[in-house]
């Protein structure tokens, strides 16, 4: 009794030690195979192990690796021979229990847990494992050996319990990410306190058996299975070899870490979720081993599952009564909210070990193992641990275990690994395991390649670093080169001495230079200070370019690049004259405003060339970040100064010409308002001390000539517009376009088309036709495109007529071009067409050259003339077919003039009578044409004023009292607004009322008041250009605009008669000079049908 009571205390202290002896392998390997312990060891072996100072190898530990190996039928075939005492004790026990053992077979869980403690023979395959903590208690009335109590306790041999072959109901534990495979350990963490408490009680009762099933969802987590569909139905029957609390906590209800040792494959047949009614395990099928009931003990007591008795006592157990209640080994688990499952064992399908396919796949798996082991050291350790207990014969004779090992050590997808676990056909399992292992091989190859590449790069960089350090040391010893930081400081000092820095800037420079001298090159602030000093010494302090103040030179340069633009050229000449008298000039801010394509941007470059100033251009269209103007703070990574400071660095002078393009399209965002930042930059009173955020020192910009461009001034903020001198550029008339095309556009287009020197002529008639029928816009950008199109078509026609024989491809290449072409053909390419690294490093011929081809020389026999007749062959049919919309205007139609962003345009106003004018009709007016608010008000004023004129001048004419009128402004898709259409609408209504057409060559513009006063308008230059383009002969404009008319160039006013008007009576006399007043004073009614009863309303009207 004493010896049996000491056994559990010995085991309780040795189980954790047993786990620690194996923890070194478990920490490296996710799963390591260990031999299943045998069931035939006696207490003599335990005493012998104790005498050899191996306390960790307890024969009663739940750790299977601590038992001895099986009979050699598996991978682990080494068996320690039994001693004489053990053989004698086993023989005596076998003779005494020969009959009872056959009738009282029970599962391994019943053996140690039942109060009778009956023994269980070895499993058929001889591979049984010890149950953890099997001797954690004894039931106690002394030992017995089937009635022979006179035997000495020292002569008895205790055999360890074995793993039950049949265990129909177990507690199920779900596993995430990787399934378990028989024979390979797995450490899991239990966080559910109920499951942890259940495991602790299972170990105490000596029944540490669970079923492990893989979650189908990789992200699922938990320790209880709520639904059988959440896990795969095929899992493993595993034994808990060790369990210990996490974080040093102890006692039930805490999380713990458990080591599982899977024994065999099982299938989940039924789930008993937590809280469900208890169901007894299903009755095994016929021919299947079933757990036997536990015989009643000598004392009347309820069966207990935590009692360990000797096998001598089990020999006298009575035969179970079939009517007796079957013992349920998992009944104590139903008090915990855990998942219990009914399971059934799975066995491999029979196979032929000598099959050629199986042998071939086995050899392939072994070869892949060798290849992976040569590339992955961690994999090599796993294979070494596995092969220590194997021999070549065992590997070939048990291929199913080799397949399990291949899947257990591979990092494959969970679904693929589960397929290996679920395969009962050995050949199919080996194929799936080989597939998983092949993927592991591919990953190992990629990992090896990456490792080699990284190592080679690191080695190369280290070598370069050490060589550079050695070279620097040698140069310093020889006095050839000083330290890099000292040399950098000296270079900054030399650059600063050449500049005329202001005193405040010089002070900042000295402070930053002193800081740089005391910083280590590896410090993060070193590069920030170095970049700041670099910018500080690259600003051209006191450096100015010599300006050219020659008037004749400026006129020559400006006329070479631009035709017309008299206002702009005069302003530049004034600027030069002031500089010539003073010897120096201050910076100015000019703003060119005009339609697109009139040369606003290009004139800035011509001004810089005329003044001999450096030129820098940047656009602010859509700009939303203030930092583009004022720079970034130096605290930001990658900070840079603003665009103006960058312009000074690039131009290397204090007095460049900076062109700010599209200033009317500047944006505004969450980073600030750039237009407000320009207020300081473009103010002559403030830009002498411009403060950039990055530089943080005042910079003098008063010598810079700023030129801005815009299409209109409406979107420019008023404070910013007030700081600039606005010069307006109107559109070009036909004469100016003709001159520009002949002098600039045609020669440039001919040169770009490769026809320089060839006899290809674009006649004046063709250019005039282009201007008249294709390009009526204010600028010349579209005209340039059409001329380039004409010359491109000519080039294509010439090449097609000459043919390819004139200059074949073999003769067109130069010698360098041929060499480059050959090198392209010889350059090796990979599958994607990219150049391999090895080919890039080797020296070879270049694949590109500066002049790869020779130009085709056009023979003198080629003559091409593009005239008005064949112009359609080059640019297609005309876009505009007439000069005006109406060659002969009907009554009610009048030509007005409007200003747009594209320049001036002719705008017609049409009025019609909607219905026949009768004495019974009622007046109304309808206005269409996509008119905005201002023009709608102008139309209402014109209607009222027209009725007042008719009432005063022609009182007998009752037209407006009876007429239904519709007024329309054509091109309804274009929005129209502006205060300049009053006299045009009034004239249209009066023309309709008097039935007198207006001369189609008369155009007019001007706003009207209710009393008939004609108000001043804007854009007279553009409107005059539009009138001339439309073929008008007279332009009527407000008298207040007479000064603008007098300032117009003569070439614009040529052929036009300008007639000012103060009141609408002046306009009326110009439009209707010969009107028949007697006829106009009568209302032209349509005849009405006579009726028997006269109409009272008609009589009243008469």
Image (tube, rainbow, N blue to C red):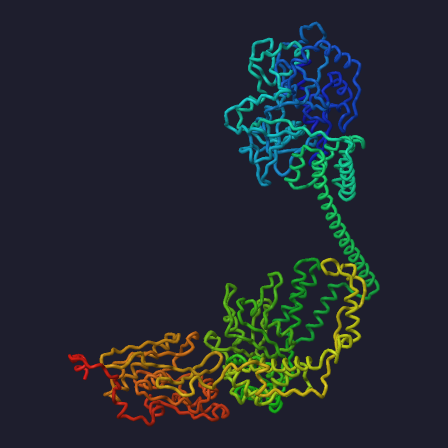
Quadrant of residue 327 in the image?
Answer: top right
**In this picture, residue 831 sits left or right of residue 631:** right
Q: Quadrant of the N terminus?
A: top right
Residue drawn 84% across the image and 64% down it: 478
Residue drawn 53% across the image and 82% down it: 878
Q: Quadrant of the C terminus?
A: bottom left
> In this picture, is 858 found above or below 502?
below
Work out which residue is located at the far right of the displayed protein and give it: 478
Work out which residue is located at the far bottom of the displayed protein and give it: 1074
Tally the marks: 0
Q: Position of residue 200 (x, y in %)?
A: 60, 25
Q: Is residue 350 visible?
A: yes
**In this picture, residue 568 sits left or right of residue 1009:** right
> In this picture, is 545 found above or below 137?
below
Q: Is residue 582 visible?
A: no
Q: Position of residue 38 (x, y in %)?
A: 73, 22
Quadrant of residue 346 in the image?
Answer: top right
**In this picture, residue 858 sits left or right of residue 719:** right
Residue drawn 76% across the image and 54% down it: 457
Which of the two residues, 329 or 964, is positioned nearer the viewer here?
Answer: 964
Q: Position of residue 394 (x, y in %)?
A: 78, 30
Q: Position of residue 242 (x, y in %)?
A: 66, 28
Quadrant of residue 1059 in the image?
Answer: bottom left
């Amino acid at each position: 009794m004493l010896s049996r009571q000491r056994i559990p205390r010995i085991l309780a202290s040795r189980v954790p030690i047993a786990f620690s002896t194996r923890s070194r392998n478990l920490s490296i390997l996710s799963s390591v195979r260990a031999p299943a312990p045998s069931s035939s060891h006696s207490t003599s072996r335990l005493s012998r192990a104790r005498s050899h100072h191996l306390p960790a190898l307890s024969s009663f530990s739940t750790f299977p690796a601590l038992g001895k190996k099986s009979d050699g039928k598996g991978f682990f075939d080494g068996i320690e021979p039994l001693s004489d005492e053990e053989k004698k004790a086993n023989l005596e026990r076998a003779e005494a229990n020969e009959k009872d053992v056959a009738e009282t077979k029970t599962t391994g869980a019943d053996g140690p847990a039942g109060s009778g403690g009956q023994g269980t023979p070895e499993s058929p395959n001889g591979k049984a494992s010890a149950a953890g903590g099997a001797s954690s208690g004894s039931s106690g009335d002394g030992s017995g050996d089937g009635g022979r109590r006179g035997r000495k306790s020292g002569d008895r041999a205790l055999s360890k319990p074995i793993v039950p072959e049949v265990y129909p109901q177990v507690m199920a534990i779900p596993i995430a990410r990787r399934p378990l495979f028989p024979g390979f350990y797995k450490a899991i963490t239990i966080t559910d306190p109920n499951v942890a408490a259940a495991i602790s009680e299972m170990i105490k009762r000596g029944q540490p058996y669970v079923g492990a099933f893989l979650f189908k969802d990789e992200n699922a987590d938990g320790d209880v299975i709520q639904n059988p569909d959440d896990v795969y139905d095929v899992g493993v029957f595993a034994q808990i070899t060790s369990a210990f609390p996490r974080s040093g906590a102890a006692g039930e209800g805490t999380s713990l870490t458990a080591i599982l040792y899977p024994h065999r494959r099982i299938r989940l047949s039924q789930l008993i979720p937590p809280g469900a009614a208890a169901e007894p395990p299903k009755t095994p099928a016929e021919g299947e081993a079933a757990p036997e009931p536990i015989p009643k003990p000598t004392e009347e007591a309820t069966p207990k599952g935590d009692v360990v008795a000797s096998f001598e006592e089990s020999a006298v157990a009575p035969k179970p009564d079939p009517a007796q209640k079957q013992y349920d080994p998992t009944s104590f688990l139903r008090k915990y909210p855990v998942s219990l499952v009914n399971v059934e064992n799975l066995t491999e399908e029979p196979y032929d070990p000598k099959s050629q396919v199986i042998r071939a796949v086995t050899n392939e798996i072994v070869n892949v193992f060798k290849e992976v082991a040569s590339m992955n050291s961690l994999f090599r350790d796993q294979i070494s641990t596995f092969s220590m207990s194997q021999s070549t014969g065992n590997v070939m004779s048990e291929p199913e275990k080799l397949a399990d090992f291949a899947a257990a050590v591979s990092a494959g997808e969970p679904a693929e690994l589960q397929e290996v676990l679920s395969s009962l056909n050995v050949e199919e399992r080996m194929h799936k395991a080989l597939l998983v292992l092949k993927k592991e091989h591919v990953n190992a190859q990629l990992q090896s390649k990456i490792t080699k590449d990284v190592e080679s790069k690191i080695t190369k960089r280290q070598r370069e670093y050490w060589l550079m350090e050695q070279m620097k040391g040698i140069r310093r010893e020889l006095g050839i080169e000083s330290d890099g930081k000292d040399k950098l400081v000296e270079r900054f000092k030399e650059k600063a001495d050449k500049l005329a820095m202001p005193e405040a800037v010089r002070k900042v420079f000295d402070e930053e230079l002193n800081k740089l001298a005391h910083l280590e090159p590896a410090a993060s602030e070193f590069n920030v200070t170095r970049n700041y000093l670099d910018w500080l010494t690259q600003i051209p302090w006191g450096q100015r370019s010599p300006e050219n103040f020659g008037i004749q030179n400026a006129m020559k340069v400006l006329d070479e690049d631009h035709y017309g633009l008299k206002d702009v050229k005069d302003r530049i000449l004034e600027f030069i004259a002031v500089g010539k008298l003073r010897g120096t000039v201050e910076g100015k801010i000019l703003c060119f405003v005009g339609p697109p394509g009139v040369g606003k941007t290009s004139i800035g470059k011509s001004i810089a060339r005329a003044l001999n100033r450096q030129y820098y251009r940047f656009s602010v269209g859509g700009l939303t970040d203030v930092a583009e103007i004022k720079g970034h703070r130096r605290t930001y990574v990658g900070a840079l100064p603003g665009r103006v400071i960058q312009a000074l660095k690039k131009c290397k002078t204090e007095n460049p010409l900076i062109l700010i393009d599209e200033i009317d399209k500047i944006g505004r965002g969450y980073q600030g308002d750039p237009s407000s930042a320009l207020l300081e930059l473009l103010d002559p009173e403030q830009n002498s001390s411009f403060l950039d955020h990055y530089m943080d020192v005042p910079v003098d910009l008063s010598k810079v000539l700023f030129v801005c461009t815009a299409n209109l001034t409406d979107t420019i903020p008023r404070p910013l517009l007030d700081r600039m001198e606005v010069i307006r550029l109107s559109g070009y008339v036909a004469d100016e376009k003709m001159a520009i095309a002949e002098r600039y556009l045609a020669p440039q287009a001919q040169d770009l088309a490769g026809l320089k020197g060839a006899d290809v002529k674009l006649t004046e008639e063709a250019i005039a036709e282009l201007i008249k029928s294709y390009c009526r816009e204010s600028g010349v950008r579209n005209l340039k495109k059409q001329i380039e199109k004409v010359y491109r078509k000519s080039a294509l026609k010439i090449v097609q007529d000459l043919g390819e024989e004139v200059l074949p491809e073999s003769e067109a290449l130069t010698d360098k071009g041929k060499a480059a072409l050959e090198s392209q053909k010889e350059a090796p390419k990979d599958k994607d067409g990219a150049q391999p690294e090895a080919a890039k490093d080797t020296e070879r011929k270049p694949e590109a050259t500066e002049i790869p081809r020779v130009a085709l020389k056009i023979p003198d026999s080629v003559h091409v003339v593009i005239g008005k007749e064949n112009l359609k062959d080059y640019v297609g049919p005309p876009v505009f077919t007439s000069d005006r919309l109406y060659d002969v205007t009907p009554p009610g139609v009048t030509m007005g003039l409007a200003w747009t962003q594209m320049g001036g345009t002719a705008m017609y106003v049409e009025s019609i009578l909607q219905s026949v004018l009768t004495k019974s009709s009622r007046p109304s007016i309808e206005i269409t044409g996509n008119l905005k608010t201002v023009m709608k008000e102008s139309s209402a004023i014109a209607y009222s004023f027209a009725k007042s004129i008719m009432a005063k001048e022609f009182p007998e004419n009752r037209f407006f009292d009876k007429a239904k009128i519709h007024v329309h402004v054509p091109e309804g898709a274009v929005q129209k607004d502006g205060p300049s259409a009053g006299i045009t609408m009034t004239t249209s209504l009066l023309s309709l009322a008097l039935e007198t057409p207006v001369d189609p060559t008369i155009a007019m513009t001007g706003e009207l008041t209710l009393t008939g006063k004609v108000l001043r308008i804007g854009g007279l230059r553009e409107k005059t250009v539009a009138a001339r383009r439309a073929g008008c002969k007279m332009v009527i404009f407000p008298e207040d605009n007479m000064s603008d008319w007098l300032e117009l160039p003569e070439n614009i006013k040529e052929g036009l008669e300008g007639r000012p008007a103060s009141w609408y009576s002046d306009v009326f006399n110009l439009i209707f000079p010969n009107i028949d007043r007697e006829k106009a004073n009568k209302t032209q009614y349509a005849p009405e049908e006579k009726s028997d009863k006269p109409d009272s309303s008609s009589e009243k009207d008469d």
